[in-house]
Image (cartoon, rainbow, N blue to C red):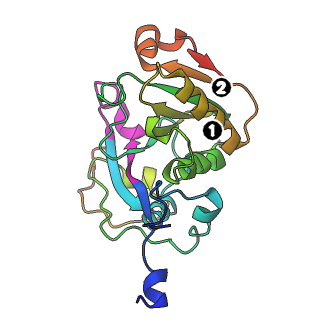
Amino acid sequence: SKSLSTILHQPHLLEHSWTFWFNNPSAKSKQAAWGSSIRPVHTFGTVEEFWGLYNNIHHPSKLLAGADFHCFKHKIEPKWEDPICANGGKWTISFPRGKSDTSWLYTLLAMIGEQFDNGDEICGAVVNVRAKQEKIAIWTKNASNESAQLSIGRQWKEFLDYNDSIGFIVHDDAIKFDRFAKNRYTI
Amino acid sequence: GDGDGDGVTSRKYTRDFLLTFSEQCTDLPVNFDIGPDIAAETLMSVPIAISHHVDRESY
């Protein structure tokens, strides 16, 4: 049988592997196509690796305005064009600049710890850091699956202890209508 | 837990449980290697060894 120290040092496997992606704000202006500077940073599959990364990278309040930082399931790219994301959408919450760190961490922990009842529907999460605000979004797979989207939105608000209403925008609508896209669901 | 118990998934961890690992896991994964096209200082909160060349165009 295993010794105690072996058990203590057994890494805690996550249900899924996840990849951190970073969109470098300084590189963005040099890139012709938006999104072309999104790069995978590292893929992790254990609780220990998650913290090893999280503890050594800037939290949203310390990222430069213009940065996008993503945590998506391994092999799902944080892009509308990704086949798994293509029919999806996203729930979004906006925070004043410098105020999203705790919510971002709690979002990550809820995802990697499989705390969402409809976790299979989740592609990943992103934080967009801008001059005056930080926006966190959870991307999902099938926007038309209303009950799953509502469940995810409801649980996300619980996990963050967030009480204002939040909206779900379908990626297709965002592509067509840009900033004028309307919420498909509100909760 | 890991296991051959009830057959239901699996690797669910509560926030409180995950948070207990925060302070003991402070080292980057051993195979961590930031790509040359990411400006490390914009992402990393600690200095790391960077192998790619320095862009001197601003001088």
Q: Compared with residue B9, is residue A103 higher up or lower down, i.e. above or below?
A: above
Tell us which disc is closer to us: 2 or 1.
Answer: 1
Q: Which residue is mark 2?
A: A166
- Position of B21 with respect to A12 (left or right) is right
Q: CA distance from mark 2 to mark 1?
A: 10 Å
Count of numbered badges drawn on the protein:
2
Q: Residues within 10 Å of mark 2 (few under 14, many from 20)?
A: some
Pointer 2 with pointer 1, Cβ within 8 A: yes
The percent position of residue B6, horizontal first and vertical second, equals 49, 60
Q: Earlier in the sequence, mark 2 or mark 1?
A: 1
Of helix, strand and loop, which one carries label 2?
loop
- Position of A91 with respect to A38 (left or right) is right
Q: Quadrant of residue B18?
A: bottom right
Disc 2: host chain: A
Range covered by the magenta-colored residues? A16-38
The percent position of residue A113, horizontal first and vertical second, equals 53, 54
The percent position of residue A170, horizontal first and vertical second, equals 47, 18
Q: Compared with residue A48, is residue A3 higher up or lower down, i.e. above or below?
A: below
Q: Is residue A32 magenta?
A: yes
Q: Is residue A19 magenta?
A: yes
Of helix, strand and loop, which one carries label 1?
helix
Rendered residue at 48%/22% (across/down):
A145
Mark 2: amino acid = Ile
Q: Which residue is mark 1?
A: A156
Mark 1: amino acid = Trp
Residue sitting farthest toward the front = B6
